[in-house]
Amino acid sequence: MSIHLIPYLMMPGNGQEVVRFYEQALDAKVLALQTYGEMPQNPDSPLPAQLNDYVGHAHLKIGESELMLSDSTDESNQAGNRVTICIATDDVEKAKKLFHALQQGGQVNHPFEKTFFSPGFGTVTDKFGVTFQIVTEG
């Protein structure tokens, strides 16, 4: 079992520009890039068409480090809260344990659950105001 921390940027709609900039400025390699338009949609609450080209998820490799980012789909994204920490592990039970430990005295932003991209994912802001995304890889 491994655990690693990855900075995660929440952008206000310019995610594709950010990716192109980091490719040039930091010699970043794009490991994955998926727009909201390419992701499975919930038929009960489809996203507005203007968000189709927004980045739903991007994963970059910069030297020996990783960086992830996506475009926010709501108005809560503003300077000061654009960086979260993604904790990635290959073990669902370990991910769940980390999620529950971090939520003590904090706030659950997205409950820990199976998603189309992960067997276990959730987002929590801890009691110190730091937001973590917990993701199970694989």
Image (cartoon, rainbow, N blue to C red):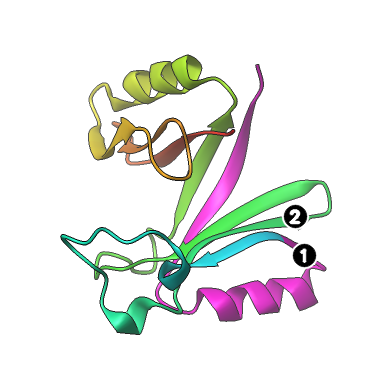
Q: How many marks?
A: 2
- Name which quarter of the figure residue 3 lies in: top right
| Image quadrant in which the C terminus is located | top right
- In the image, taking residue 45 as reference, residue 129 lies left or right, namely right
**In what quadrant of the picture does the N terminus appear?**
top right
The residue identified by callout 2 is 61
10 Å crowding of disc 2: few (<14), some (14-19), many (20+): some
State the image coordinates of residue 126 (x, y, percent, origin top left).
Answer: 32, 33
Nearer to me, 51 or 100: 51
> Where in the figure is residue 36, as x and y percent of width and height?
42, 68
Q: Residue at x 78, y 77 (%)?
A: 24
In the rendered image, the vertical position of residue 58 relative to residue 119, given as above or below: below
Seen at 26% across and 68% down, the residue is 74
Q: Which residue in the protein does label 1 denote?
A: 28
Q: CA distance from mark 2 to mark 1?
A: 6 Å
Name the secondary structure under disc 2: strand
On the rendered structure, is 60 left or right of 134? right
Q: Which residues are magenta?
A: 1-30
Amino acid found under the numbered disc labelled 2: Lys
User: Magenta stretch containing residue 71, yes or no?
Assistant: no
Local secondary structure at mark 1: loop
Say if the magenta span includes residue 5: yes
Discs 2, 1 touching: Cβ within 8 Å: yes
Mark 1 neighbour density, 10 Å: few (under 14) some (14–19) many (20 or more) = many
Q: Quadrant of residue 6?
A: top right
Residue 82 x %, y %: 43, 60
Quadrant of the rendered image containing residue 124: top left
- Image-based side of 64 in relation to 94, left or right: right
| Residue visible at 56% across and 77% down in the picture | 16
Dot label at residue 125: none
Q: Residue at x 42, y 39 (%)?
A: 132
